[in-house]
Amino acid sequence: MADFDFYAYISRMKYIKRWCLMHSEVEENIKEHSFDVTVLAHALAVIGNVYYGKNYDVEKVVLYATYHETSEVITGDLPTPIKYFNEKINVAYKDLERLACEKLLATLPEKIREEYSKSVLPDSTSPEYVIVKCADRLSAYIKCLEELKIGNKEFAKAKTSIYKDVLKYDLEEVKYFIEKVLPVYGKTLDELE
């Protein structure tokens, strides 16, 4: 592989569709999803830092979120019910994701590879990583709300299940977001103006 192929791979995120087991009125790809997760993770980190005295490294949060789906340009988007069907599949898939990320990182010049590695293969024990995981679930929940709003009942069960996942994080900044920010996602354009 040539140096800098990484960027062409990342550009292909727009071709990887999400929600492949469900009918979506509005299709979503992992590039769009990654942007949404970045915005949400940034918001959670800022809310945590400003309102609750947390000490999130906001730059780390944004970079982790930006690159959190990069492995999927190689693996595709494995649906959640399959990914978490049992522990064996989950562990195998995490290994596959790691190998995909390592393959992507190998397409960068060695001099800059380590810098990218910090974001593409983040510290999964860090608070910044946890915020990104929560933002990832929030993004999925918002997708459910949007699909239901336009009459797609296909997302009703997912909405309930994903909301329970979000609440498991039990973070003040998440509760704040749910109470203060989440309701605006139901507004029409006219109501926003």
Image (spheres, rainbow, N blue to C red):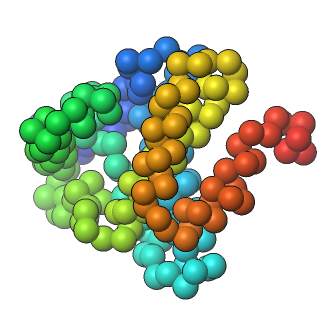
At 53% from the left edge and 35% from the top edge, which residue is drawn?
159
Q: Is residue 48 above or below residue 90?
A: below
Residue 160: x and y in percent read: 52, 37
Relative to residue 88, is residue 134 drawn left or right?
right
Relative to residue 49, is residue 182 drawn left or right?
right
Residue 37 visible (yes or no): no
Residue 59: x and y in percent read: 44, 69
Q: How many marks?
A: 0
Q: Is residue 180 above or below residue 22?
A: below
At 42% from the left edge and 25% from the top edge, which residue is drawn?
19
Quadrant housing residue 97: top left
Q: Is residue 149 or residue 111 the one in the foreground?
A: 149
Quadrant housing residue 15: top left
Q: Is residue 80 above or below residue 43?
A: above
Residue 98 visible (yes or no): yes
Q: Is residue 97 or residue 141 the one in the foreground?
A: 141
Identity of the residue furthest to the bottom in this view: 53
Q: Is residue 191 or residue 120 the one in the foreground?
A: 191
Q: Is residue 155 or residue 131 the one in the foreground?
A: 155
At 64% from the left edge and 26% from the top edge, which residue is drawn?
148
Residue 6: x and y in percent read: 25, 43
Residue 107: x and y in percent read: 17, 44
Q: Is residue 44 above or below residue 138?
A: below
Split into 4 quadrants, where in the image is the N terminus? top left
Relative to residue 88, is residue 40 drawn left or right?
right
At 55% from the left edge and 27% from the top edge, which residue is drawn?
156
Split into 4 quadrants, where in the image is the C terminus? top right
